C-alpha cells in the first residue's frame, strides 16, 4: 500500500459530478473495479443506469484516495450485509480503516461520493426532480417538516431537499449527533446532502479529462480535474466552488443536527 498522510479526523470530503465527467476522468477506469462489482454492473439492463453505477463506484475511489492518502486502486470500498453476513451488499466500508465512513449516490446522470470520520451518508438528486406522493413522504420523513414544505406556494424544491436530507441520514445510520450539510451544485443542477459525524465538509467537483481544477496532489491523486472548497460546521458557510461550467454554486447552508 502507498504510504501517505493520515485521514483528517475533523472533516469529511464530498465529490459531485456528472456521470460523464467521471467516466472521462483520466485517474479512474473500469479496470479498478472488483470482479463482483463488474458482474453486478453487467447485469443492469439500462445503459444509462449502468453508467451511473459505474461512475459512482469510480468516484468513491477518487474521494477515498484524496481523504486517506491511498491511490484510487487501493481505495476500493467493500460491502457486507449485517443481516446475512454475505459480501457484495450492505453499507460500503473501507477495508483496513474501521474509523472511516464512505458513501456513494447516483441519480439520472449525476453521481456523488463522501468519505469522513465515523458514519457518513451522501445523496444527490437532479434539482428538477419532484418527490412524492405526499402520503409516501409522510411515512418516510418527519411529518411536521413535510407539512411545512407542502404548504409553500411551490412545495417541490423544499420536498426534494427533505428527501435528499433523509436519504443522507439513512445512509449514515440515522443515529443522533450527525451533522447535516446541504448545497445546490448549480453547474450540474444537482441537490446534495451529506450526513456526517465530522465538524466540516470539504466539497468538490470532478470536471473530467482536459479540465484543470485547483491544485491538490496526494498519493497519486492529482488536482487536475478536481476543484475543492471548505465548508465549516458553524453557522452558514457561503463558499463557492468552480465547476465544469466555470460558475459558482449556491451558498451552502448548514442544516444542523440530524434527527
Image (spheres, grey):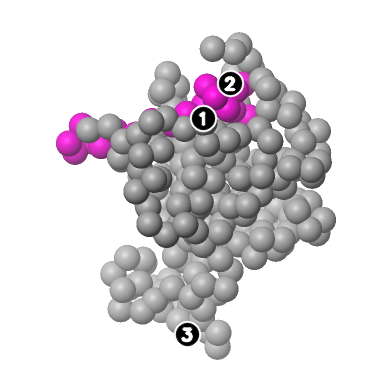
Q: Residue at x 66, y 44 (%)?
A: 24
In front of the other: 28 or 180: 28
Quadrant in the picture for the C terminus: bottom left
Which quadrant would the N terminus be assigned to in this image?
top right
Counting residues from the start of the chain, the first of labels 2 and 3 encountered is 2
Left or right of 119? Residue 223 is right
Kindly identify which residue carries mark 1. Answer: 32
Let me know if residue 182 appears in the view: no
Q: Are marks 1 and 3 in contact (CB under 8 Å)?
A: no
- Element type where label 2 sits in the image: loop
**Is 190 one of the magenta-colored residues?**
no
- Sequence-wise, the earlier of marks 2 and 1 is 1
Residue occupying the point 46% across, 78% down: 148
- The magenta stretch is 65-85
Q: Is residue 80 above or below residue 40?
A: above
- Tag 1 secondary structure: helix
133 or 141, nearer to the observer: 133
Q: Residues within 10 Å of mark 2 (few under 14, many from 20)?
A: many
Is residue 145 visible in the rendered structure shown here? yes
Residue 96 appears at what percent x and percent y? 42, 18
Q: Which mark is residue 151?
A: 3
| Mark 1 or mark 3, earlier in chain | 1
Distance of label 1 from label 3 (alpha carbons):
47 Å
Q: Where is 30 relative to 126, above or below?
A: above
Residue matched to label 2: 70
Q: Position of residue 240 (x, y in %)?
A: 77, 53
Where residue 34 appears, x then y in whole percent? 42, 30
**Nearer the camera: disc 2 or disc 3:** 2
Amino acid at each position: 500500500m502507498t504510504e501517505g498522510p493520515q485521514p483528517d479526523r475533523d472533516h469529511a470530503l464530498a465529490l459531485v459530478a456528472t456521470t460523464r465527467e467521471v467516466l472521462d476522468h483520466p485517474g479512474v477506469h473500469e479496470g479498478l473495479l472488483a470482479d463482483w462489482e463488474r458482474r453486478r454492473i453487467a447485469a443492469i439492463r439500462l445503459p444509462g443506469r449502468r453508467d451511473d453505477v459505474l461512475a459512482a463506484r469510480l468516484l468513491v475511489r477518487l474521494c477515498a484516495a484524496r481523504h486517506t492518502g491511498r491511490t484510487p486502486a487501493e481505495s476500493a470500498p467493500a460491502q457486507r450485509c449485517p443481516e446475512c453476513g454475505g459480501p457484495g451488499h450492505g453499507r460500503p466500508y473501507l477495508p483496513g480503516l474501521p474509523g472511516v465512513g464512505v458513501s456513494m449516490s447516483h441519480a439520472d446522470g449525476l453521481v456523488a461520493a463522501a468519505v469522513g470520520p465515523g458514519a457518513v451518508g451522501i445523496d444527490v438528486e437532479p434539482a428538477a426532480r419532484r418527490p412524492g406522493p405526499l402520503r409516501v413522504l409522510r411515512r418516510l420523513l418527519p411529518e411536521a417538516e413535510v407539512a411545512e414544505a407542502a404548504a409553500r406556494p411551490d412545495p417541490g424544491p423544499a420536498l426534494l431537499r427533505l428527501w435528499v436530507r433523509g436519504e443522507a441520514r439513512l445512509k449514515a445510520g440515522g443515529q443522533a449527533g450527525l451533522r447535516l450539510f446541504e448545497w445546490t451544485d448549480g453547474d450540474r443542477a444537482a441537490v446534495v446532502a451529506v450526513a456526517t459525524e465530522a465538524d466540516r465538509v470539504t466539497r468538490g467537483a470532478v470536471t473530467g479529462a482536459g479540465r484543470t481544477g485547483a491544485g491538490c496532489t496526494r498519493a497519486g491523486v492529482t488536482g487536475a480535474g478536481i476543484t475543492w472548497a471548505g465548508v465549516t460546521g458553524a453557522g452558514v458557510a457561503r463558499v463557492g466552488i468552480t465547476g465544469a461550467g466555470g460558475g459558482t454554486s449556491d451558498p451552502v447552508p448548514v442544516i444542523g443536527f440530524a434527527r
